[in-house]
Image (cartoon, coloured by chain):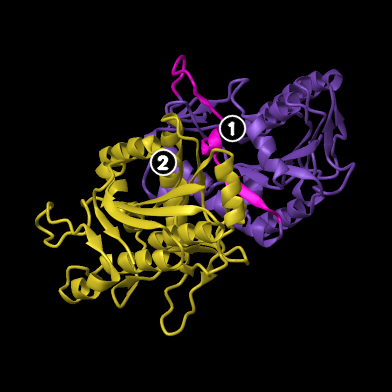
Chain colours: A purple, B yellow
Amino acid sequence: MEITVVKIGGNVIDRPADLTSFLKNFAALSGNKILVHGGGKLATQLSAKLGIPAKMIDGRRVTDSQTIEIVTMVYAGLINKSITAQLQSLGCDAAGFSGADAGIIRAVKRSPCPVDFGFVGDIPDDGINAARLLTFINMGLVPVFCSITADEHGVLLNCNADTIAQSVATALSSAGASAKLIYCFEKQGLLSDLNDDSSVIPLINSANCGKLKAEGIISAGMIPKIDNAFKALTTGVKEVVIKSHFDLNRDGKGTKIIQ
Amino acid sequence: MEITVVKIGGNVIDRPADLTSFLKNFAALSGNKILVHGGGKLATQLSAKLGIPAKMIDGRRVTDSQTIEIVTMVYAGLINKSITAQLQSLGCDAAGFSGADAGIIRAVKRSPCPVDFGFVGDIPDDGINAARLLTFINMGLVPVFCSITADEHGVLLNCNADTIAQSVATALSSAGASAKLIYCFEKQGLLSDLNDDSSVIPLINSANCGKLKAEGIISAGMIPKIDNAFKALTTGVKEVVIKSHFDLNRDGKGTKIIQ
């Protein structure tokens, strides 16, 4: 069975017109598919409105008990259900899930040592119930995951959505499916010049990846995305592509990552 | 197939200890089951914190565009995922759903005439996809519904959770299942004297219902609940009981409603 796992980034979710455009493309994507969505700025805005101060350690946000409630409301509630309802209206038989639902994704709370980031989860290698996910897909459903999961004690945790997409694609591959992973965002791919949208690097492999990192072309938020991509490829995922949400259905666009 | 549909009220959800106690009882309930939960006061509190004024017409809340976002966040996000994660940790294979998910419940926006209550939905007779719900139950899943649904255009709507419970039980009965409906709340049943917890009326039928309404014993929020109960019974539901969440697993407790 072939399955395409699509991750859509927060910057697209933040712009209603872009999100609608993406969802139309996603609904039109043929074959079995899964959507994983990030969060966007809504949670940060809601926290600010409620006067909950952002706690940062080393430039990274701490998910305290108030923040996990906020992100659960925004990601698992408003964004997940808005996306699911829109996809259903487009004829795409979507079902929105957190990791807790049907026990599909079990996470583990990140160790508080050396840094306590709070209610943040990581997904262990056996954390995805691929058999159940495949049952849903065989029913014709299109699972839509937010980044909220839970641990075995029922504690809600926020995970990285890129990592969820990779973990899901890896688990499906291990279960015998042929999984493809697409990271969709607002750029046309990995750009060699951030100010030039046409400077898309068509191919990244283990040979040129180190050089691109050293040159700072793969930098900041792109580093974990590329690392996730390589992790997916080394764990059985057939193909990883980083591309624009406008190009979702256009083959050959974006940056292809191979081993 | 026998299925118990349990609706849990907002007052239980508002008290964490009561909710945990209820969820333990619900997890221990034998057989196929579905949970429908109300909202509690969290959404009202969040609206107040955000300075969104409550709009009321004839004592009933109007669900404007800001309010439907709030209730979607609180009901479909925080409450639904907290309940689902807790049930999973108790060994109950719960899956949280809004009506939009997997197209299970299609609602219709209530007509703005004579009164425009905003983003409020009603469930048409053919609004429940019982076949899909039965597929999930046959997988061993325990569906957990919040009161958020969507119409065919992907517009999110808030429905009455009591009505969702009745509509689900009715649709399952029409599809050949033997459905039982339990409305769980903080009282031990319908009380003839609100100040006396032992004054539970054991049985309501169409013969004594009118008298109880005339005497004001069935009043306020209990009227639509009893009306929903009778609607369920006249549309094939086998049994309707109103009882305390403490008594969920105790037969013979509460108020039984028969035709």
The answer to whether residue B254 is left or right of residue B238 is left
Image disc number at residue B83: 2
By secondary structure, the bulk of the magenta-drawn segment is best described as loop
* Other residues around mark 2 within 10 Å, as few (<14) / some (14–19) / many (≥20): many
In the rendered image, residue A16, in percent from the top left (x then y), is placed at 63, 58
Q: Quadrant of residue A230?
A: top right
In the rendered image, residue A259, in percent from the top left (x then y), is placed at 84, 21
Question: Looking at the figure, which quarter contains the N terminus of chain A?
Answer: top right
What segment is highlighted magenta in the picture? A92-116
Q: Quadrant of residue A64?
A: top left
In the rendered image, residue A165, in percent from the top left (x then y), is placed at 67, 34
Outermost residue toward the top in this view: A114
Q: Nearer the viewer, residue B74 or A196?
A: B74
- Residue B11 visible in the snapshot: no
Query: Could you tell me which residue is drawn at 55 percent across and 44 percent down?
Result: B137
The answer to whether residue B38 is left or right of residue B202 is right
Q: Nearer the viewer, residue B155 or A139?
A: A139
Dot 1 falls on a residue whose secondary structure is loop
Q: Nearer the viewer, residue B193 or A243?
A: B193
The residue that label 1 is drawn on is: A160
Label 1 marks a residue whose chain is: A
Query: Could you tell me which residue is drawn at 57 percent across and 51 percent down?
Result: B133
Q: Amino acid at mark 2?
A: Ile
The answer to whether residue A140 is magenta is: no
